[in-house]
Image (cartoon, grey):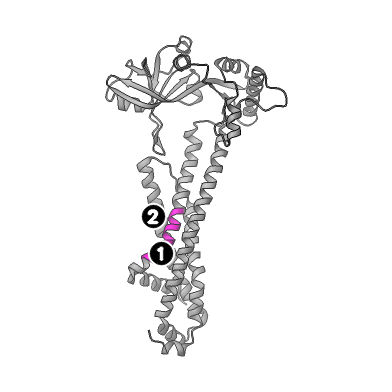
Amino acid sequence: MNILESMRIALQSLWANKMRSVLTLLGVVIGVAAVIAVVTFVSGVNGYVAEKIFNLGADVFFASKTPSVITNVDQFLEVQKRKRLTLEDYQAVADGCKSCKAVGAAANIGNGHIKYETRGSSDTRVRGWTPSMASIYDLDVIAGRSITDADNDTASHVAVIGHDIFDNLMPGADPLGKEIRVDGEVFTVVGLAKKEGKTLGQSRDNWVMVPITSWQRMYGDRKNSVEIWAKAYGVGSVLESGMDEVRVILRARRHDPPGKPDSFEVSNNETFLSLWANISGSFFIATIALASISLIIGGIVIMNIMLVSVTERTREIGIRKALGARKRDVLAQFLIEAGTMSLTGGIIGILTGIVVAKTVTLLIGMPSAIKLWAVLAGVIVSASVGIFFGVFPARRAAELHPIVALRFEL
Protein backbone atom coordinates (compact mmCIF):
# COMPACT_ATOMS: atom_id res chain seq x y z
CA MET A 1 0.00 0.00 0.00
CA ASN A 2 1.56 3.28 -1.15
CA ILE A 3 0.76 5.99 1.39
CA LEU A 4 1.90 8.82 -0.90
CA GLU A 5 -0.30 7.49 -3.68
CA SER A 6 -3.33 7.43 -1.36
CA MET A 7 -2.61 11.01 -0.30
CA ARG A 8 -2.31 12.05 -3.95
CA ILE A 9 -5.68 10.45 -4.73
CA ALA A 10 -7.27 12.27 -1.80
CA LEU A 11 -5.86 15.64 -2.89
CA GLN A 12 -6.98 15.03 -6.48
CA SER A 13 -10.49 14.28 -5.20
CA LEU A 14 -10.49 17.52 -3.21
CA TRP A 15 -9.30 19.51 -6.22
CA ALA A 16 -11.76 17.90 -8.62
CA ASN A 17 -14.74 18.79 -6.40
CA LYS A 18 -13.78 22.25 -5.15
CA MET A 19 -17.14 23.40 -3.83
CA ARG A 20 -17.81 20.10 -2.11
CA SER A 21 -14.32 20.17 -0.66
CA VAL A 22 -14.79 23.68 0.75
CA LEU A 23 -18.07 22.71 2.39
CA THR A 24 -16.55 19.47 3.65
CA LEU A 25 -13.55 21.07 5.27
CA LEU A 26 -15.33 24.19 6.56
CA GLY A 27 -16.04 22.74 10.00
CA VAL A 28 -12.43 21.60 10.48
CA VAL A 29 -11.10 24.93 9.20
CA ILE A 30 -13.32 26.96 11.56
CA GLY A 31 -12.55 24.77 14.56
CA VAL A 32 -8.77 24.75 14.08
CA ALA A 33 -8.70 28.46 13.16
CA ALA A 34 -10.62 29.33 16.33
CA VAL A 35 -8.24 27.34 18.52
CA ILE A 36 -5.12 28.80 16.88
CA ALA A 37 -6.47 32.36 17.08
CA VAL A 38 -7.43 32.00 20.74
CA VAL A 39 -4.10 30.40 21.71
CA THR A 40 -2.27 33.15 19.81
CA PHE A 41 -4.26 35.88 21.55
CA VAL A 42 -4.06 34.32 25.03
CA SER A 43 -0.31 33.76 24.72
CA GLY A 44 0.25 37.27 23.46
CA VAL A 45 -1.92 38.91 26.09
CA ASN A 46 -0.37 36.79 28.86
CA GLY A 47 3.07 38.08 27.93
CA TYR A 48 1.80 41.62 27.55
CA VAL A 49 0.02 41.51 30.89
CA ALA A 50 3.16 40.28 32.60
CA GLU A 51 5.42 42.87 30.99
CA LYS A 52 3.41 46.02 30.37
CA ILE A 53 -0.21 46.28 31.45
CA PHE A 54 0.47 46.12 35.18
CA ASN A 55 3.95 47.50 34.60
CA LEU A 56 5.13 45.83 37.79
CA GLY A 57 8.51 44.26 38.23
CA ALA A 58 8.89 41.09 40.24
CA ASP A 59 10.10 43.23 43.16
CA VAL A 60 7.18 45.72 43.16
CA PHE A 61 4.03 45.64 45.31
CA PHE A 62 1.39 48.10 46.46
CA ALA A 63 -1.21 48.69 49.15
CA SER A 64 -4.70 50.04 48.43
CA LYS A 65 -8.01 50.59 50.16
CA THR A 66 -9.91 48.18 47.91
CA PRO A 67 -8.92 45.04 46.00
CA SER A 68 -8.35 45.38 42.27
CA VAL A 69 -11.22 43.00 41.52
CA ILE A 70 -14.41 42.75 43.60
CA THR A 71 -16.29 39.50 43.03
CA ASN A 72 -19.53 39.93 45.00
CA VAL A 73 -21.85 42.50 46.56
CA ASP A 74 -20.93 41.64 50.15
CA GLN A 75 -17.27 42.29 49.43
CA PHE A 76 -18.16 45.59 47.75
CA LEU A 77 -20.18 46.74 50.74
CA GLU A 78 -17.42 45.70 53.14
CA VAL A 79 -14.63 47.58 51.36
CA GLN A 80 -16.72 50.76 51.13
CA LYS A 81 -16.63 50.97 54.92
CA ARG A 82 -12.85 50.98 55.04
CA LYS A 83 -10.88 54.09 55.88
CA ARG A 84 -8.97 55.65 53.01
CA LEU A 85 -5.18 55.53 52.76
CA THR A 86 -3.55 58.93 53.12
CA LEU A 87 -0.26 60.62 52.37
CA GLU A 88 0.51 60.30 56.08
CA ASP A 89 0.20 56.52 55.69
CA TYR A 90 2.53 56.71 52.71
CA GLN A 91 5.08 58.70 54.71
CA ALA A 92 4.90 56.19 57.57
CA VAL A 93 5.55 53.33 55.15
CA ALA A 94 8.40 55.25 53.49
CA ASP A 95 10.01 55.85 56.91
CA GLY A 96 9.37 52.41 58.39
CA CYS A 97 9.82 49.86 55.59
CA LYS A 98 13.44 48.72 55.84
CA SER A 99 13.09 46.15 53.05
CA CYS A 100 11.78 48.76 50.61
CA LYS A 101 14.21 50.31 48.16
CA ALA A 102 11.67 52.96 47.12
CA VAL A 103 8.17 53.92 48.25
CA GLY A 104 5.70 56.12 46.37
CA ALA A 105 2.08 57.21 46.44
CA ALA A 106 -0.37 57.52 43.55
CA ALA A 107 -3.94 58.66 42.94
CA ASN A 108 -5.84 58.55 39.65
CA ILE A 109 -8.95 59.82 37.98
CA GLY A 110 -9.95 58.47 34.58
CA ASN A 111 -12.18 61.16 33.06
CA GLY A 112 -10.07 64.30 33.12
CA HIS A 113 -10.53 67.05 30.53
CA ILE A 114 -7.33 68.49 29.06
CA LYS A 115 -7.20 71.63 26.93
CA TYR A 116 -4.42 73.36 25.02
CA GLU A 117 -5.34 76.53 23.14
CA THR A 118 -8.38 75.51 21.02
CA ARG A 119 -7.80 71.76 21.18
CA GLY A 120 -9.14 69.50 23.90
CA SER A 121 -9.05 65.92 25.10
CA SER A 122 -11.62 64.14 27.26
CA ASP A 123 -11.49 60.90 29.23
CA THR A 124 -7.83 61.48 29.96
CA ARG A 125 -6.33 59.75 32.97
CA VAL A 126 -5.00 62.32 35.44
CA ARG A 127 -2.30 60.80 37.64
CA GLY A 128 -1.24 62.28 40.94
CA TRP A 129 2.21 60.91 41.76
CA THR A 130 5.01 61.37 44.20
CA PRO A 131 8.43 61.72 42.49
CA SER A 132 9.54 58.19 43.46
CA MET A 133 6.66 56.69 41.46
CA ALA A 134 8.55 57.34 38.23
CA SER A 135 11.29 54.86 39.17
CA ILE A 136 8.86 52.31 40.65
CA TYR A 137 6.57 52.44 37.60
CA ASP A 138 9.52 52.58 35.21
CA LEU A 139 8.33 55.79 33.55
CA ASP A 140 10.55 56.83 30.66
CA VAL A 141 10.62 60.61 30.13
CA ILE A 142 12.13 61.33 26.70
CA ALA A 143 11.99 65.13 26.86
CA GLY A 144 12.25 67.49 29.80
CA ARG A 145 12.04 66.07 33.31
CA SER A 146 9.77 64.28 35.70
CA ILE A 147 8.26 65.88 38.80
CA THR A 148 10.54 66.52 41.78
CA ASP A 149 10.28 66.61 45.56
CA ALA A 150 10.20 70.41 45.36
CA ASP A 151 7.22 70.22 42.99
CA ASN A 152 5.45 67.90 45.39
CA ASP A 153 6.28 69.90 48.51
CA THR A 154 4.95 73.13 47.02
CA ALA A 155 2.05 71.57 45.09
CA SER A 156 3.46 73.12 41.91
CA HIS A 157 1.29 73.27 38.81
CA VAL A 158 3.68 71.30 36.59
CA ALA A 159 2.81 68.25 34.51
CA VAL A 160 4.34 65.40 32.54
CA ILE A 161 2.19 64.40 29.57
CA GLY A 162 1.61 61.15 27.73
CA HIS A 163 2.29 61.02 24.01
CA ASP A 164 -1.39 61.23 23.02
CA ILE A 165 -1.66 64.69 24.58
CA PHE A 166 1.38 65.79 22.58
CA ASP A 167 0.20 64.21 19.30
CA ASN A 168 -3.40 65.42 19.48
CA LEU A 169 -3.18 68.78 21.23
CA MET A 170 0.20 70.21 20.23
CA PRO A 171 1.42 68.37 17.09
CA GLY A 172 4.72 69.59 15.74
CA ALA A 173 5.33 71.97 18.63
CA ASP A 174 7.83 71.75 21.48
CA PRO A 175 5.61 70.75 24.43
CA LEU A 176 8.05 71.88 27.12
CA GLY A 177 6.97 75.11 28.76
CA LYS A 178 3.49 75.04 27.21
CA GLU A 179 0.50 75.70 29.46
CA ILE A 180 -2.39 73.25 29.47
CA ARG A 181 -5.62 73.19 31.43
CA VAL A 182 -6.35 70.09 33.48
CA ASP A 183 -10.01 70.19 34.50
CA GLY A 184 -9.81 73.97 34.45
CA GLU A 185 -6.50 74.30 36.32
CA VAL A 186 -3.46 75.69 34.47
CA PHE A 187 -0.34 73.48 34.46
CA THR A 188 3.03 73.96 32.77
CA VAL A 189 4.35 70.99 30.82
CA VAL A 190 7.82 70.02 32.06
CA GLY A 191 8.15 66.53 30.58
CA LEU A 192 7.04 64.23 27.73
CA ALA A 193 6.86 60.47 28.28
CA LYS A 194 7.86 57.78 25.80
CA LYS A 195 5.09 56.45 23.56
CA GLU A 196 3.68 53.15 24.87
CA GLY A 197 1.11 52.33 22.15
CA LYS A 198 -2.26 50.59 22.38
CA THR A 199 -3.60 47.54 24.16
CA LEU A 200 -6.91 45.95 23.12
CA GLY A 201 -7.64 49.09 21.11
CA GLN A 202 -7.13 51.37 24.12
CA SER A 203 -4.29 53.89 24.15
CA ARG A 204 -1.80 53.76 27.01
CA ASP A 205 -0.59 57.31 26.27
CA ASN A 206 -3.71 59.35 27.08
CA TRP A 207 -2.65 60.66 30.49
CA VAL A 208 -1.27 63.62 32.39
CA MET A 209 0.85 63.26 35.53
CA VAL A 210 0.96 66.00 38.20
CA PRO A 211 2.35 66.16 41.77
CA ILE A 212 0.04 64.24 44.09
CA THR A 213 -0.33 67.27 46.36
CA SER A 214 -1.62 69.29 43.40
CA TRP A 215 -3.90 66.42 42.48
CA GLN A 216 -5.40 66.35 45.97
CA ARG A 217 -5.99 70.11 45.95
CA MET A 218 -7.92 69.72 42.70
CA TYR A 219 -9.94 66.61 43.45
CA GLY A 220 -9.95 66.52 47.24
CA ASP A 221 -8.28 64.18 49.71
CA ARG A 222 -11.26 63.42 51.94
CA LYS A 223 -12.91 60.87 49.66
CA ASN A 224 -10.05 59.79 47.40
CA SER A 225 -7.74 57.14 48.79
CA VAL A 226 -4.14 56.95 47.62
CA GLU A 227 -2.28 53.79 46.63
CA ILE A 228 1.07 53.15 48.29
CA TRP A 229 3.62 51.58 45.95
CA ALA A 230 6.91 50.05 46.96
CA LYS A 231 9.92 48.43 45.32
CA ALA A 232 11.74 45.87 47.46
CA TYR A 233 15.49 45.25 47.44
CA GLY A 234 14.90 41.89 45.81
CA VAL A 235 12.41 39.11 45.18
CA GLY A 236 11.41 36.02 47.11
CA SER A 237 11.88 36.34 50.85
CA VAL A 238 13.00 39.97 50.56
CA LEU A 239 9.79 40.88 48.76
CA GLU A 240 7.72 38.97 51.31
CA SER A 241 9.52 40.80 54.13
CA GLY A 242 8.73 44.14 52.54
CA MET A 243 5.05 43.25 52.14
CA ASP A 244 4.91 42.06 55.74
CA GLU A 245 6.54 45.27 56.99
CA VAL A 246 4.03 47.40 55.08
CA ARG A 247 1.17 45.28 56.40
CA VAL A 248 2.37 45.68 60.01
CA ILE A 249 2.80 49.45 59.63
CA LEU A 250 -0.65 49.96 58.11
CA ARG A 251 -2.42 47.63 60.56
CA ALA A 252 -0.91 49.60 63.45
CA ARG A 253 -1.89 52.96 61.98
CA ARG A 254 -5.42 51.78 61.14
CA HIS A 255 -5.85 50.00 64.51
CA ASP A 256 -6.81 46.66 62.96
CA PRO A 257 -7.57 44.24 65.87
CA PRO A 258 -5.32 41.18 66.24
CA GLY A 259 -6.77 38.15 64.48
CA LYS A 260 -8.98 40.26 62.24
CA PRO A 261 -8.44 40.62 58.46
CA ASP A 262 -6.55 43.60 57.06
CA SER A 263 -8.66 46.69 56.37
CA PHE A 264 -6.66 47.22 53.15
CA GLU A 265 -5.16 45.16 50.34
CA VAL A 266 -1.51 44.38 49.62
CA SER A 267 -0.86 42.99 46.14
CA ASN A 268 2.08 42.26 43.89
CA ASN A 269 2.70 41.06 40.35
CA GLU A 270 1.80 37.45 41.17
CA THR A 271 -1.63 38.52 42.41
CA PHE A 272 -2.51 40.02 39.04
CA LEU A 273 -0.90 37.28 37.00
CA SER A 274 -2.72 34.51 38.88
CA LEU A 275 -6.01 36.39 38.49
CA TRP A 276 -5.41 36.85 34.78
CA ALA A 277 -4.35 33.22 34.41
CA ASN A 278 -7.69 32.12 35.90
CA ILE A 279 -9.63 34.44 33.59
CA SER A 280 -7.71 33.54 30.45
CA GLY A 281 -7.78 29.85 31.37
CA SER A 282 -11.58 29.86 31.66
CA PHE A 283 -11.86 31.76 28.39
CA PHE A 284 -9.51 29.29 26.70
CA ILE A 285 -11.46 26.26 27.94
CA ALA A 286 -14.78 27.77 26.80
CA THR A 287 -13.37 28.49 23.35
CA ILE A 288 -11.87 25.02 23.05
CA ALA A 289 -15.27 23.55 23.91
CA LEU A 290 -16.97 25.61 21.20
CA ALA A 291 -14.22 24.79 18.70
CA SER A 292 -14.61 21.09 19.53
CA ILE A 293 -18.25 21.27 18.47
CA SER A 294 -17.13 22.69 15.13
CA LEU A 295 -14.51 19.93 14.78
CA ILE A 296 -17.10 17.25 15.55
CA ILE A 297 -19.45 18.71 12.92
CA GLY A 298 -16.56 18.84 10.49
CA GLY A 299 -15.74 15.21 11.25
CA ILE A 300 -19.34 14.15 10.65
CA VAL A 301 -19.32 15.96 7.31
CA ILE A 302 -16.07 14.23 6.37
CA MET A 303 -17.61 10.86 7.28
CA ASN A 304 -20.64 11.65 5.14
CA ILE A 305 -18.49 12.66 2.16
CA MET A 306 -16.35 9.54 2.58
CA LEU A 307 -19.51 7.41 2.49
CA VAL A 308 -20.47 9.15 -0.74
CA SER A 309 -16.94 8.54 -2.05
CA VAL A 310 -17.19 4.84 -1.21
CA THR A 311 -20.46 4.63 -3.14
CA GLU A 312 -19.00 6.51 -6.12
CA ARG A 313 -15.92 4.28 -6.20
CA THR A 314 -17.54 0.91 -5.55
CA ARG A 315 -16.46 -0.51 -8.93
CA GLU A 316 -12.93 0.81 -8.38
CA ILE A 317 -12.86 -1.01 -5.03
CA GLY A 318 -14.07 -4.19 -6.74
CA ILE A 319 -11.30 -3.95 -9.38
CA ARG A 320 -8.66 -3.38 -6.69
CA LYS A 321 -9.85 -6.41 -4.76
CA ALA A 322 -10.00 -8.51 -7.89
CA LEU A 323 -6.37 -7.59 -8.55
CA GLY A 324 -5.33 -8.78 -5.09
CA ALA A 325 -5.95 -5.85 -2.72
CA ARG A 326 -6.63 -7.06 0.80
CA LYS A 327 -9.18 -5.66 3.24
CA ARG A 328 -6.50 -3.83 5.20
CA ASP A 329 -5.22 -2.24 1.99
CA VAL A 330 -8.64 -0.79 1.16
CA LEU A 331 -9.16 0.21 4.80
CA ALA A 332 -5.79 1.97 4.91
CA GLN A 333 -6.46 3.75 1.61
CA PHE A 334 -9.71 5.32 2.77
CA LEU A 335 -8.33 6.17 6.23
CA ILE A 336 -5.37 7.92 4.62
CA GLU A 337 -7.72 9.82 2.32
CA ALA A 338 -9.94 10.88 5.23
CA GLY A 339 -6.89 11.92 7.27
CA THR A 340 -5.47 13.84 4.30
CA MET A 341 -8.75 15.71 3.82
CA SER A 342 -8.98 16.78 7.45
CA LEU A 343 -5.24 17.52 7.62
CA THR A 344 -5.65 19.84 4.64
CA GLY A 345 -8.51 21.54 6.46
CA GLY A 346 -6.34 21.77 9.57
CA ILE A 347 -3.46 23.44 7.72
CA ILE A 348 -5.86 25.93 6.13
CA GLY A 349 -7.37 26.52 9.59
CA ILE A 350 -3.93 27.14 11.13
CA LEU A 351 -3.04 29.67 8.46
CA THR A 352 -6.47 31.30 8.79
CA GLY A 353 -6.18 31.54 12.56
CA ILE A 354 -2.72 33.12 12.36
CA VAL A 355 -3.83 35.61 9.68
CA VAL A 356 -6.93 36.57 11.71
CA ALA A 357 -4.89 37.02 14.90
CA LYS A 358 -2.22 39.15 13.24
CA THR A 359 -4.86 41.21 11.39
CA VAL A 360 -6.63 41.98 14.68
CA THR A 361 -3.26 42.89 16.20
CA LEU A 362 -2.63 45.38 13.41
CA LEU A 363 -6.14 46.85 13.62
CA ILE A 364 -6.70 47.23 17.36
CA GLY A 365 -3.34 46.46 18.94
CA MET A 366 -4.35 43.23 20.72
CA PRO A 367 -1.10 41.39 21.51
CA SER A 368 -0.59 38.01 19.85
CA ALA A 369 2.13 35.38 19.93
CA ILE A 370 2.29 32.27 17.74
CA LYS A 371 3.08 29.11 19.68
CA LEU A 372 4.70 26.14 17.93
CA TRP A 373 2.93 23.66 20.20
CA ALA A 374 -0.44 25.09 19.17
CA VAL A 375 0.43 24.69 15.47
CA LEU A 376 1.55 21.09 16.02
CA ALA A 377 -1.56 20.37 18.11
CA GLY A 378 -3.73 21.77 15.29
CA VAL A 379 -2.08 19.48 12.77
CA ILE A 380 -2.40 16.39 14.98
CA VAL A 381 -6.01 17.09 16.04
CA SER A 382 -7.22 17.79 12.52
CA ALA A 383 -5.62 14.61 11.16
CA SER A 384 -7.02 12.60 14.08
CA VAL A 385 -10.54 13.91 13.44
CA GLY A 386 -10.39 12.70 9.85
CA ILE A 387 -9.05 9.28 10.79
CA PHE A 388 -11.58 8.84 13.62
CA PHE A 389 -14.57 9.74 11.50
CA GLY A 390 -13.16 7.93 8.49
CA VAL A 391 -13.10 4.52 10.20
CA PHE A 392 -16.75 3.68 9.45
CA PRO A 393 -16.62 4.55 5.71
CA ALA A 394 -13.24 2.81 5.39
CA ARG A 395 -14.55 -0.38 7.04
CA ARG A 396 -17.61 -0.28 4.81
CA ALA A 397 -15.36 -0.07 1.75
CA ALA A 398 -13.09 -2.85 3.04
CA GLU A 399 -16.02 -5.19 3.63
CA LEU A 400 -17.31 -4.93 0.06
CA HIS A 401 -17.26 -8.26 -1.83
CA PRO A 402 -15.35 -7.90 -5.11
CA ILE A 403 -18.06 -9.60 -7.24
CA VAL A 404 -20.82 -7.40 -5.75
CA ALA A 405 -18.61 -4.33 -6.19
CA LEU A 406 -17.89 -5.13 -9.86
CA ARG A 407 -21.64 -5.51 -10.58
CA PHE A 408 -22.49 -2.23 -8.86
CA GLU A 409 -23.81 0.62 -11.00
CA LEU A 410 -24.65 4.15 -9.89
Q: Position of residue 286 (x, y in %)?
A: 52, 51
Of residues 215 and 219, the one nearer the viewer is: 219
What residue occupies the far top of the structure in this picture?
154
Q: Establish if 79 lies above or below 304.
A: above
Q: Mark 1 = which residue? A: 25
Of residues 360 and 379, the one nearer the viewer is: 360
Query: Is residue 376 at all visible to an observer of this figure?
Result: no
In the rendered view, does 232 fall on the left or right side of 189? Answer: right
Secondary structure under tag 1 reads helix
**Labelled disc at residue 352:** 2
Q: Establish if 244 lies above or below 333.
A: above
Q: CA distance from mark 1 to mark 2?
A: 13 Å
Q: Name the residue at 53% across, 40% down.
A: 276
Is residue 27 part of the magenta span, yes or no?
A: yes
Based on the displayed image, in which of its 4 quarters is residue 263 positioned? top right
> Label 2 is placed on what type of residue?
Thr
Q: Main secondary structure of the magenta part?
A: helix
Earlier residue among tags 1 and 2? 1
Q: Position of residue 319 (x, y in %)?
A: 42, 86
Magenta span of residues: 22-34
- Quadrant location, the C terminus: bottom left
> Label 1 is placed on what type of residue?
Leu
- Say which of marks 1 and 2 sits in front: 1
Count of all numbered marks drawn on residues in the image: 2
